[in-house]
């Protein structure tokens, strides 16, 4: 019996997503829970698994097209023992494909932990054998995996094979007569949509210099304790914790403007988004309830989320719910930037490069000082300059005099 299977509701109000890769072809026999395809939501890659075993008879959506939630995704001829179970309902695959509830749909499983069976159909005869993570790497550089010599069993293509192919060829993009052209898809397409919408919001930027001599001394003092817990301590956990403390004093900065623009929503907790540069583009994983987390917990969670972002393993829940955001652009260079507010959030801060600069001390003597320029962008429909200045000063005091921050930790 042939039967259509529908793209499930992935959550967070998503109504469509890009079909990034079919992991099967028409005519393939698949097993229950086998990954069928990769789809890209606004910022997360999700694998859709098969709920039942059978033979794929038709793929309704082409690679690169937008798949609609609750619309037919593929058709399957059910195995005899499965066909007696009755028609498939959308709810049957919701729980199996939600990025929050199934390991099969987690964003980008480990490259070598999920072996992928080669296709035996005529249409997939030239399809390379590779894991989803390797296929994503190939897509980033517009590489046809069928052209890459695989070093694994039965010609399986590994990450090292793709990297070797890149070193020996210039085919990173689709070329045209006048140069090269690359389609905007996935994370970059989502960023283009969000940032275009964000620029319609009236906003302003506020910048100030932070003196971090005392904070650097505290970091150096605490670093060995963190190393004993196998955690590398950076400045960012201090910035996140201090931000949470400042939000307790100025909750308006952690609110969001409702869709109708007529009311403010105050979330239960401080959920800080941290921008991470990844091969797929900019992702912003979220550290939830920072008010309840210690410096050690924040540092450990930040390391885990950053690693998951770079390897494409973030879940939808880890990418949503931020009430305020930080961008540590200084790690890549530059001292001043104007970050773009990501609605419905009201504010975002960009941290510049840490510099050792001459400054006058209280005795008017020139002293070497560790300076970081921090720039805020805020939604001017809700936040005025005076409020932002006071909030920033509160945050700055905790960072410039970290003893005050430690006094409020619990």
Image: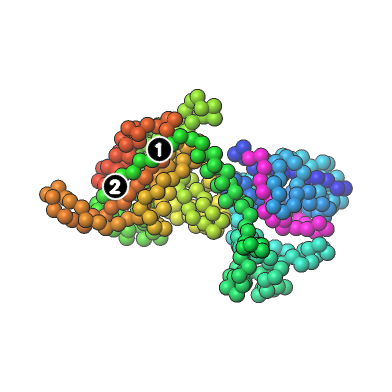
- Kindly give the residue lying farthest to the front in the view shown: 178
Name which of mark 2 and mark 1 comes first in the sequence.
1
Residue 270 shows in this picture: no
SS category of the residue bearing label 1: strand
Regarding residue 19, the answer to whether it shows in the image is yes
Q: Which mark is residue 204?
A: 1
Q: Quadrant of residue 169?
A: bottom right
Residue 103 position within the rendered picture, expressed as x and y whole percent measured from the top left: 62, 52
Disc 2/disc 1 C-alpha distance (Å): 17 Å
* Residue 15 part of the magenta-drawn span: yes
Which image quadrant is residue 380 in?
A: top left
Q: Which residues are magenta?
A: 14-38
- Residue at the top extreme? 262
Q: Is residue 153 magenta?
A: no
Q: Which residue is mark 2?
A: 209
**Residue at 84%, 51% in the rendered image:** 77
Query: In x, y percent, where is residue 288?
Result: 47, 43
Q: Camera-side residue: 40 or 296?
A: 40
Quadrant, the C terminus: top left
């Amino acid at each position: 019996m042939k039967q259509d299977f529908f793209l499930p509701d992935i959550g967070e109000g998503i109504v469509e997503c890009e079909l990034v890769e079919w992991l099967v072809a028409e005519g393939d026999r698949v097993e229950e829970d086998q990954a069928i395809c990769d789809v890209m939501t606004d910022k997360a890659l999700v694998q859709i698994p098969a709920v039942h075993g059978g033979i794929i008879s038709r793929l309704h959506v082409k690679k690169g097209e937008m798949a609609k939630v609750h619309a037919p995704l593929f058709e399957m001829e059910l195995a005899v023992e499965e066909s007696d179970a009755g028609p498939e309902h959308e709810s049957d695959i919701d729980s199996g494909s939600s990025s929050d509830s199934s390991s099969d749909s987690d964003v980008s499983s480990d490259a070598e932990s999920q072996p992928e069976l080669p296709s035996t159909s005529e249409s997939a005869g030239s399809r390379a054998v590779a894991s989803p993570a390797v296929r994503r790497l190939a897509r980033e550089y517009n590489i046809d995996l069928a052209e890459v010599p695989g070093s694994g069993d039965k010609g399986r293509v590994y990450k090292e094979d793709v990297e070797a192919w890149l070193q020996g060829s210039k085919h990173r993009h689709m070329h045209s007569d006048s140069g090269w052209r690359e389609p905007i898809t996935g994370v970059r397409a989502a960023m283009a949509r969000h940032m275009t919408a964000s620029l319609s919001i009236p906003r302003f930027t506020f910048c100030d210099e932070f003196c971090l001599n005392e904070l650097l001394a505290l970091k150096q003092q605490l670093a060995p304790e963190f190393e004993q817990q196998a955690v590398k301590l950076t400045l960012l956990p201090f910035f996140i914790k201090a931000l949470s403390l400042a939000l307790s004093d100025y909750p308006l900065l952690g609110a969001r403007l409702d869709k109708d623009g007529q009311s403010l929503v105050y979330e239960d907790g401080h959920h800080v988004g941290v921008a991470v540069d990844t091969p797929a583009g900019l992702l912003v994983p979220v550290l939830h309830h920072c008010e309840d987390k210690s410096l050690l917990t924040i540092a450990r969670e930040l390391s885990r989320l950053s690693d998951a972002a770079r390897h494409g393993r973030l879940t939808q829940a880890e990418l949503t719910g931020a009430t305020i955001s930080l961008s540590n652009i200084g790690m890549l260079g530059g001292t001043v930037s104007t970050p773009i507010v990501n609605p419905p959030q009201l504010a975002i801060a960009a941290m510049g490069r840490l510099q050792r600069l001459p400054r006058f001390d209280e005795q008017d003597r020139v002293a070497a000082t560790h300076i970081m320029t921090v720039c805020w962008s805020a939604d001017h429909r809700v936040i005025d300059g005076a409020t932002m200045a006071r909030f920033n000063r509160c945050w700055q005091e905790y960072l410039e005099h970290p003893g005050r921050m430690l006094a409020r930790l619990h």
